[in-house]
């Protein structure tokens, strides 16, 4: 495993960044407020995800303290009018889009509360790891507000409209195990083991070719949203582009010559 090094990106005190080899790590670092996400933090996330050095190949996002994130910083909500509310929500959309459709794949490691905007943030990443302490909620319904960070778009794609509706209408929360069964996470770990798992996954992802990672994170979700006939056409294009890459050719040759690892059974 690579050792930790500083990452030269200027961030607010609510965020902390480092790098380990080709993996950049970003930590929500405001545990005294349960990593509630204020405007400064959202803009800091934008700075981070748009300033990654070119030799970074994947990211791990995690949170400090007992909770991943308590969502939107509610103390900033009180003074906004409708116009300011729309601008604020649009800002979250812009920033979270830079995560989902950014330079590199992002692995999110979750623990404790993953609620409201915290769940929206996690949903904008590509692979989610949940420690068993994780629980999920969308308390917006009971607070008289509504999700504004892209949750209506991303969360139903993970768990369906009906479950999200239930969470918002009734305040229902889900455990880490339920979330794993429903698709909110795809890895479940014991408490304290999520970061190591997330880092190992990010290192594995960093070993893929950049073109393949681009196809998987930028093209796959778009194909899933278009009509199947157009989807097949886009798939033909991106698969032929990927396989024409020199690195793809050398990897295929390595397999055919018995020098590449085989696909193994799950543990
Ligand atoms: C906060 C926030 C926050 C904590 N904004 N300050 N999100 C929520 O509705 C979740 C609200 N938070 C909670 O339910 C709880 O804080 C937790 C379950 C996450 C953690 O509980 P606990 O007992 O560990 O901490 P605490 O004592 O509730 O909070 C510690 C401090 O963090 C306290 O401040 P202090 O100055 O009194 O110490 C809390 O006020 C503060 N804090 N959560 C501001 N969210 C783009 S739209 C998205 C819309 C949403 O995300 S709505 C969901 C908002």
Image: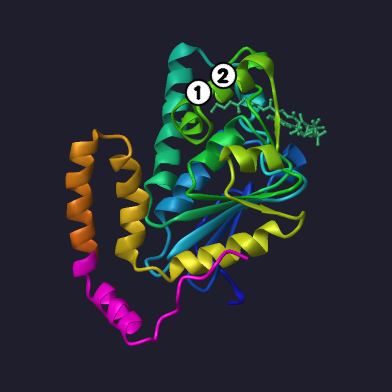
Q: Which residue is mark 1?
A: 161
- Tell me how far mark 2 sits from mark 1, CA to CA: 6 Å
Quick check: 90 above or below 85? below
Tell me where residue 37 sits by quadrant.
top right
Q: Which residue is mark 2?
A: 165
Residue 131, given in percent of the width and then of the height, sits at: 71, 50
Residue 233, given in percent of the width and then of the height, sits at: 17, 46
Residue at mark 2: C-beta within 8 A of ligand 1: no
| Residue name at image x 23 percent, y 67 percent | 243
**Residue 228: assigned label:** none
The foreground one among 235 and 15 is 235
Circle 1: is it few (<14), some (14-19), or many (20+) Cα within 10 Å?
some
Residue 96, given in percent of the width and then of the height, sits at: 45, 40
The quadrant of the rendered image in which ligand 1 is seen is top right
Residue 263, given in percent of the width and then of the height, sits at: 46, 70
Q: Quadrant of the C terminus?
A: bottom right
CB atoms at circles 2 and 1 under 8 Å apart? yes
| Residue name at image x 19 percent, y 38 percent | 229
Quick check: 106 above or below 146? below
Numbered disc total: 2
Magenta segment: 243-267
- Label 2 sits on a secondary structure element that is helix
Instruction: Judge from the rendering whether residue 150 lies leftward or rightward of residue 17; answer left or right.
Output: left
The foreground one among 218 and 38 is 218
The answer to whether residue 267 is seen in the rendering is yes
Tell me where residue 265 sits by quadrant.
bottom right
| Residue name at image x 54 percent, y 21 percent | 162
The answer to whether residue 28 is seen in the rendering is no
Quick check: 145 above or below 98? above
The stretch drawn in magenta includes residue 263: yes
The foreground one among 265 and 181 is 265
Instruction: Judge from the rendering whether residue 32 lies leftward or rightward of residue 44; answer left or right.
Output: right
């Amino acid at each position: 495993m690579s050792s930790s090094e500083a990452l030269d990106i200027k961030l607010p005190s609510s965020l902390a960044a480092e790098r380990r080899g080709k993996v950049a790590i970003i930590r929500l670092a405001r545990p005294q407020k349960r990593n509630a996400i204020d405007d400064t933090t959202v803009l800091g996330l934008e700075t981070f995800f748009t300033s990654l050095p070119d030799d970074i190949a994947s990211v791990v996002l995690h949170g400090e303290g007992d909770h991943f994130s308590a969502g939107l910083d509610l103390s900033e909500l009180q003074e906004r009018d409708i116009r300011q509310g729309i601008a604020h929500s649009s800002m979250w959309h812009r920033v979270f889009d830079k995560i989902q459709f950014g330079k590199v794949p992002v692995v999110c490691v979750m623990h404790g509360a993953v609620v409201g905007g915290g769940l929206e943030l996690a949903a904008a990443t590509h692979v989610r790891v949940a420690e068993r302490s994780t629980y999920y909620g969308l308390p917006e319904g009971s607070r008289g507000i509504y999700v504004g960070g892209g949750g209506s778009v991303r969360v139903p794609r993970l768990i369906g409209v009906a479950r999200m509706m239930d969470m918002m209408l009734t305040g229902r929360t889900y455990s880490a195990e339920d979330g794993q069964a429903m698709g909110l996470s795809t890895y479940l770990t014991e408490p304290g083991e999520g970061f190591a798992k997330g880092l190992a996954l990010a290192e594995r992802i960093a070993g893929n070719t950049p073109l393949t990672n681009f196809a998987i994170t930028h093209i796959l979700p778009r194909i899933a949203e278009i009509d199947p006939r157009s989807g097949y056409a886009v798939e033909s294009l991106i698969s032929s582009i990927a396989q024409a890459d020199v690195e793809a050719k050398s990897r295929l040759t390595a397999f055919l010559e018995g020098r590449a690892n085989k696909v193994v059974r799950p543990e």
